Amino acid sequence: MDEKGTAQKEFYGLFRKNCLPLLGKYETERKNKFLIFAITGGISGAAFIISLLLYFVISPIELYQQIFIISGACTAIILTIAKTTGKAFERKIKAEVMPEFCKCLGDFQWNPMFGVNSQLFAQAGVIPRKYDKEESDDIFKGTYKDVSIEINEVCYKDIRITYDSKGRLRREEYTLFDGVVAELGMNKNFKSHTVVASDSLLHGSPVSGLRHTTLEDVTFEKMFDVFTNDEVEARYLLTPTFMERLINVKKAFKCDKLSCAFYRDKLFISIDTRKDMFVLGSLTKPADDEKQFFQMFEEITSIIELIDQLKLDKKIGL
Amino acid sequence: MDLSVIVLLVVAALIIFAFYGMYVSLIQKKNKVMEAFSSISVQLKKRYDLIPNILTLAGKFMEHEKSLMEEVTKLRTQAISLPEDINSIGKKLELDSQIRNKMGQIMVAVENYPQLKSDQTMVHAMQTYNEVEEHIAAARRFYNSAVLELNNAVEIFPSSLVAGMVGVRRQEFFKVDEAETKPVNAADYLK
């Protein structure tokens, strides 16, 4: 069995021993909540659809209109409450289970409150410098093979105020970044600032003071743009093998945007996955459903594996 | 003023600007090659500064490698005495290649001296030496990339015209030694 297979088996064993017993008590609560929302949501939703059909197909009388307006509003309210309750339920489960879950992962800690230092990531040049709204979800901190790692699921949004044709004010949120950011310890000493960003036509640097440079790997050059303030150190960090590994990481995550920056003795990585990761405690699934935890384990390990893929634990200079 | 004269003046101005643009770009590329060359020199200097420390430490324990160490010292002296001139880069890198090979042999031989191998000062010196090696490799890659950009500009029309007029010439790439591309046989070092 390979290293990953062994780690997975070990995790499954520890999870079943330490985490599963904690989840059993939430199942009754989840069932009750699900039942309430399923019944109330089902009734109001059905009333909305039936009254809508009656009004438009049979006869447009005022009673049907009133029913579909009221039932429509009720459905919307119930769905909103269900979503909020679902989130609160997820938080509750995570608060109790995640510390144990992290112990199963190894030397890791989970912190829902304090996200990574976004300013530092913006200075490094891997996330947008300007954004109006930041949503930070889960943060995992720990050490893997003596390399420090901090993982955070984040979303950065821009709020744009527009006016419609009738002059009414509209507030729209545009997602600038939705994915995972990670801060990793580095195996090499460096003083310069180097950013590897997804390839763009104009080769605009994400950080001022950095110069675009061309490296010798043609495939890498097609996928990424490199900006640096020290051409030699950039090549010292971005060895041909490292470039190859970064290409593989981008392919593995199947994402359009992957950036990394060598800044202040650390490696900053951002992966714009555009999907909600580390999801737990769904009201529609049993609380002790192992699959969601194993899915989360896979997602976290895919990030931690960056250390293996980029060989950050090796001081071999490749 | 006649329209045709205005058109001629505009065309002439455009040509002058285009030529000036090419001239600026060529000089920038030439200077980048110089910058890359000086970065190689800086990294080589770091290695030359480090070699005496390693040899002094190694000399305390290694008795069978005295001649190897003397050769390194000789080569280092030759390399240092070369002028800091882009025309001497070929010779400089040739000497450097020899130094690197000999130093590689010394590093492998260190394995035969457990006391030396575990000496913290030696461990640190070897780590620093390896880091400098990586920096030299990076500097060479930077030099080759700068030379590629310059050579393309010097050889491709129309900037080749401007290059000919202002005397900007193509530069030689740094080539890897044939010996360096051959697979390493560890047994040769561990005899």
Image (tube, rainbow, N blue to C red):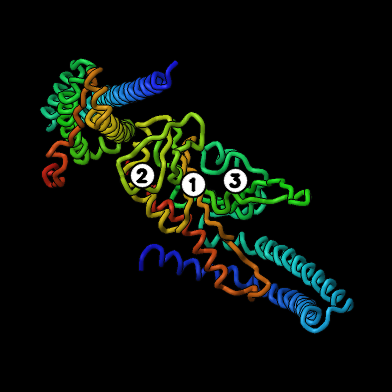
Report the mark closest to the observer, 3 or 1: 1
Which residue type carries mark 3?
A: Val
Label 3 crowd (10 A; few <14 / some 14-19 / many >=20): many
Query: Can the viewer see residue A13?
Result: yes
Residue in the picture at 52% in, 64% down = A297
Q: Which residue bears the numbered disc 1?
A: A269
Give SS at disc 3.
loop
**Marks 2 and 3, the one that precedes in the sequence:** 3
Image disc number at residue A221: 2
Which residue type carries mark 1?
A: Ile
> Does residue A240 appear to the left or right of A121 in the view shown?
left
Q: Could you tell me which chain the residue with mark 2 belongs to?
A: A
- Look at the image and tell me in which quarter the N terminus of chain B lies: top left
Residue in the picture at 45% in, 69% down = A9
Query: Where in the figure is residue A84, as x and y percent of width and height?
Result: 74, 63
Give SS at disc 1.
strand
Residue B168 placement: quadrant: top left
Give SS at disc 2.
helix
- Look at the image and tell me in which quarter the C terminus of chain B lies: top left
Query: Can the viewer see residue B13?
Result: no
